[in-house]
Image (cartoon, rainbow, N blue to C red):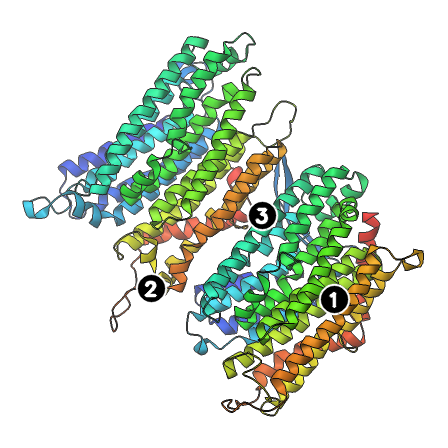
Amino acid sequence: MTILEIIVTLPLLAALVIGLGAPARFTALGASVLVLIMSLVTALRFSPSIEGALQNVSSRPLMQMDGFPSLSLSFGLDGISLVMLLLSAIVMVAAVLVSPKESDLKHSPRLFYLSLLLIGGGAIGAFCSTDLFFLYAFHELALIPTFLMIGIFGTGKNRLRTAWTITIYLGVGSLVLLVGLILAVIGLGGSTFNIEELTALASDAPMAAEMQNWVFFLLLVGFGVLVSLFPFHSWAAPAYAEAPAPVAMLHAGVLKKFGLYGLIRVALPFAPAGAEVLLNLVLVLLLGNIIYIGLVTIAQKSLDRMLGYSSVMHMGYIFLGIAASNELGLSGAVLLMFAHGISIALLFAMSGWLREKYGTLEFNKLGGIGKQVPKLGLLFGFAAFASAGLPGFANFAAEVEVFIGAFAGAQDGLGWIQWATIISLWGVVISAVYMLRAYRAIFMGPIPEKLEAPADICWSMRLPLIILLVALTAVGFVPELLNQFIRPAITVLLAAAG
Amino acid sequence: MPVYFLEIIVVALGLIMLLVDAFAKIKDKRCIAWTGMVGLLVVFGLLFNVQWPESTDGAFWEFYSSNDQISLFYKGIAIISTLIVLIMAADFRHIVVAQTADPEKGAHPQAGLGEFFALPMFACAGLMLMASANNLVSIFVSLETVTITFYILVTYLRRNVGSLEAGVKYLILGALSTGFLVYGFAWIYGITGSMQLSEITTALAKPEVNSIAALFAFALILVALAFKVGGAPFHFWIPDVYQGAPTPITAFLSVGSKAAGFIVFLRLVSPFLASDVLADKVTLVLATIAGITLIMGNLAAMPQKNFKRLLAYSSVAHAGFLLMALASAPTKSSEGSLSPATVVTFYLGAYLLMTLLAFLVITTVRNSIAGEEIESYKGLAKRSPFLAFMLIISMASLAGIPLTAGFYGKLFVFKIAADQGNWTLLVIGLIGAAAGFYYYLKIAVPVFFGNPAIDEGEKLSTIHVSAPARTAMVILTIAIIAAGVNPNLIIGLFS
């Protein structure tokens, strides 16, 4: 077994052990910390000098059958998936840490931790798979656990409805995605599921133009639903608002990145001509994400919904980087996936804590609590600034890369994408508006009379927040930490896509 | 050991069980079921050690029985489903006793149990015969062996109105469909002059074949077979019969009977598909039936409130997916595609695992919860996390969530449909699969989100799971997940 196989198996194994009766929180924490350590070790041993090639490769052939692509359980990392693995591992540790203690959970704590591990483990498996089938299958592992988590442990009266919405929405989205993937595999000869081989096939013997359009369209819709691309976004904000904080962290922070990862890893290289044809559609939709959803975000009256919509909105920038389809834009998109994942996890962790202590997240019922919980106030300020894209945080570095990447080529006159970039830039202002308004409404001003002061965050809460914040600032000051991995992988990808 | 010994052993076992029931005085009649289970396990082991005859020229092989790996696989399906049906039947004994004999009128306290355990053995033998039948006569005889046994079993709870109603419906419609089948056979014999499938294939492939008569024969056979496997619009008996029949028998119907129906379907349809003259029209008819079945099954399953009824419609829906695979048989121009036989066989193998798991849970829960309404499963997760987990695994697999065997089944079906460019069917199948997410997960709502319906202060009772049932459930779950990662575990068994 390679270290990567252990990383993928460990969370699932831990979930099984918890199901069989092991102490839930302890096992979950142990497994996720181990995964984080092993991922960091993998990153340290990862040599960017091997230009873009897959590393830590392992492959177990499963099935060879006439008329069906060969199937193998294979894992491997390139720079992009390594960054995604790090993101998943970091957020998973934080999510387990902020999870309530077993005694504080009214319902089965085992189910809670088991589901959490399945959601995180599924994401890790999806990012590490080099086989298209398992890339898809691991992602789906999260479907039922999410349903149960929101339905059982969620907050709010409508949680059952929300659980249904997200499950049906994502289920249908993943079926569309499945058809797109089947079509892509058939179009590329139908002999293998291996992503590397398929990518090579796509550049040697590309699909017919019409087929490429269909494949890219289906993949765009399928992955787009998972990423909450406008207009398929309506599941996201309520689900994140009503999910328990650790689930929201994992879902908004990690799982949602799967769709973007899939677009970069599968849709662009498999159907590059389709991507070019549908570029303008993507631009319109991403402006919907940035501007329309941005304005919707400003209008929100409670923190959890606002964060949910803000996470939908920020997907627009990543789409912009993908639409740019050049080295800078794409590597900025990957970096932004990391940055956004960490920062939204940070914000959801704190909003979960606030909801638990104050019983509400509505702006007009809160106020001035910066005096009551100064440490949280400070950390929240950092997170809000990061999310709004202030320099010094990873989000800034990534957004700059995306904008410059998308604006590249402007010397030949402004094309659609440059105009879209110019409009998107206003999104930064919108983010600043809603983040600062939220900060003011919650932490500043007079304290409403009824609000009693809880104790400030203790170490078990501080630790995950600090882990996340350190990751965010480290990458913010030295983007090269991750860019050194991302860049060679993007070069290979672009070379393959021609 | 020659392959036909397997059926002989199963019939002999059934007879022994009946004789023991009649003449031996036993305290606990579950012994009879246990004998059957052990016997079937032995037969299942023998399945891997059968010897093929050196020459297959004799009348028996030529006319009666084909000897391919797929038929062995279907025999395996028959044995496993009967084995698990016996496990369920043993757990179901209280209800059988309560609804057959009236102890107040002096009936034996375990009256009726012996036959309830022995009869499935005969159905099993029939199903095994059907798996290798390659002659219209042997197909008909084995089909009727099974169906007549089911007539008795469905209506076994004779003091229960639902069971009686189900029995009458099944009897009348079953007899009607048998009539269609025989009539169709007669036409085929008239056209081709043979009862043997290989000769029929040759005769139908000739360009001068009377295509109108052949299509008429096909239509008659299709009606009968669609009835057996639950294809729309001949599926109307399914919900009522599934709901009314004793739960173990419902499981038997939905797995054993369906699997056998599909192998007969495969065998009878392939001569028509192999004929250039008929293939297009036959495919069109099959595709239409598949489409209607998918829509009817999936949409009708959505509002169901009774768990068995929901599973009945789900079984119709699965028949739709299987028919979709049959309707996507590769034409000669597209070689190197999946064969419908592989897809259907894999699907049925996966379907066996997940459906039996679901029914095992229903039977076990039925002992402590009165009724099979979905609402009555409220709070099951609190009473028995084990059963709740098993239930969610089987539902996930039925819905086709990846990393369960059910997903590969659907994936193969979609793949073969896409290979053949059956886009309309593919879209209908996708809508059906999406509906499946809803109605299978609907079960999880009361199980995980509800609270058990008990009075305040009353202690929450756990649900007893018998040792054989527990073992079977764990094995089935492991098989579902293992085959969901590596489908070759099932495919390797028959190819």
**Which image quadrant is residue A127 in?**
bottom right
- In three-dimensional space, the C-alpha distance between marks 3 and 2, rounded to whole angstroms, equals 34 Å
> Is residue A405 placed above or below B318 in the rendered structure?
below
Evaluate if marks 1 and 2 touch, with contact meaning CB atoms under 8 Å apart: no
Please state which of residues A285 and A480 is positioned toward the viewer in this rendering.
Answer: A285
Task: Report in which chain the residue with disc 3 lies.
Answer: A
Q: Crowding near pointer 1: few (<14 within 10 Å), some, many (20+)?
A: many
Q: Position of residue B299 (x, y in %)?
A: 44, 43
Q: Residue furthest left?
A: B105
Q: Please state which of the two labelled residues, at mark 1 or mark 2, is closer to the viewer.
A: 1
Closer to the chain start, of discs 3 and 1, is 3
Identify residue type, mark 2: Arg
Q: Secondary structure at mark 1?
A: helix
> Is residue B224 placed above or below A496 in the rendered structure?
above
Circle number at residue A175:
3
Which residue is label 2 attached to?
A: B383
- Left or right of A194? Residue B117 is left
Q: Secondary structure at mark 3?
A: helix
- In three-dimensional space, the C-alpha distance between marks 3 and 1, rounded to whole angstroms, equals 27 Å
Identify residue type, mark 1: Leu
Circle number at residue A336:
1
